Image: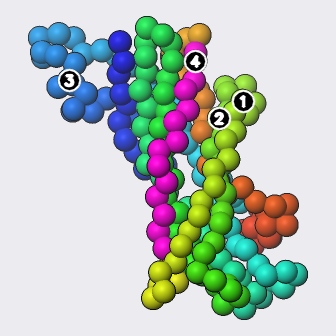
Amino acid sequence: MVFACGLRRVAMFGSVAVAGLLAACGSSFFEEPVIPACPRAFLPSDTASLTEFNGAGRDLTDVIVQADFDGYNGNCAYDLDDKVVEILISPVILAELGPAATNRNASLQYFVALKDPDGNFIEKSVFDVALVFPNNLNLVRYRDEEVTLKLPLDDVWAGPDYEIYLGFQMSRDQLDYNRRLGGN
């Protein structure tokens, strides 16, 4: 038996049920099933932005590309019989070419990581993003295809205790730059 959780954006991941789910579950004469909430998703501030510079300079004129997460869409579905939660997440990225860009393309990477209830990261996947800026625009909005995580659980009620983290995959210098900028 598979049930889907609702769709949320940016702050929390999923709700227990939505009207469409209730209609799909059958007649209103039956008691509606209780299903666990979706795991929560987080976008840490130190990995939510990425600035790529052209060498050692850190001036605005040295920026090749600046990218920020503009949120994400996501949902989950529980298979109560097989004790699996399938998590779907689709990040949205805004990117702007800087004055130091030498062409109309940029390559970035982002990650999706899963943390267990004990605070251990148990899975991390890195995804490539190839951006192409039209000739008349220096700003693009990119929405990636859904990333799917399948989480087997001994107890499906532990699903909400897991956490999902998204962010840009970056170098130590880029992370330090973000932390200095944000005061983290």
CA distance for labels 2 and 4: 12 Å
Q: Which mark is residue 114?
A: 2
Residue 141 colored magenta?
yes
Residue 122: assigned label: 1
Q: Earlier in the sequence, mark 3 or mark 4?
A: 3
Query: Relative to 36, is 184 on the left or the right?
Result: right
Q: Disc 2 or 3, which lies upstream in sequence?
A: 3
Kind of residue at badge 3: Ala
Q: Determine the image quadrant of residue 5.
A: top left
Please tell me in which quadrant of the rendered image residue 54 appears: bottom right
In the image, is 8 to the left or to the right of 115? left
Residue 145, how many percent across, how many down? Answer: 47, 49
Tag 1 near tag 4, CB within 8 Å: no
Residues rendered magenta in the picture: 140-153
Please say whether residue 59 is visible from this viewpoint.
yes
Assess disc 4: are there few (<14), some (14-19) or many (≥20) residues with their C-alpha within 10 Å of its C-alpha.
some
Q: In x, y percent, where is residue 151?
A: 57, 24
Crowdedness near tag 2: few (<14), some (14–19) or many (≥20) residues, C-alpha within 10 Å: many
Q: Residue at x 42, y 37 (%)?
A: 75
- The label on residue 24 is 3
Residue that carries the numbered disc 4 in the rendered image? 152
Say which residue appears at 65% left-offset and 66% top-offset.
107
User: Gap between marks 2 and 3, in whole Å?
Assistant: 30 Å
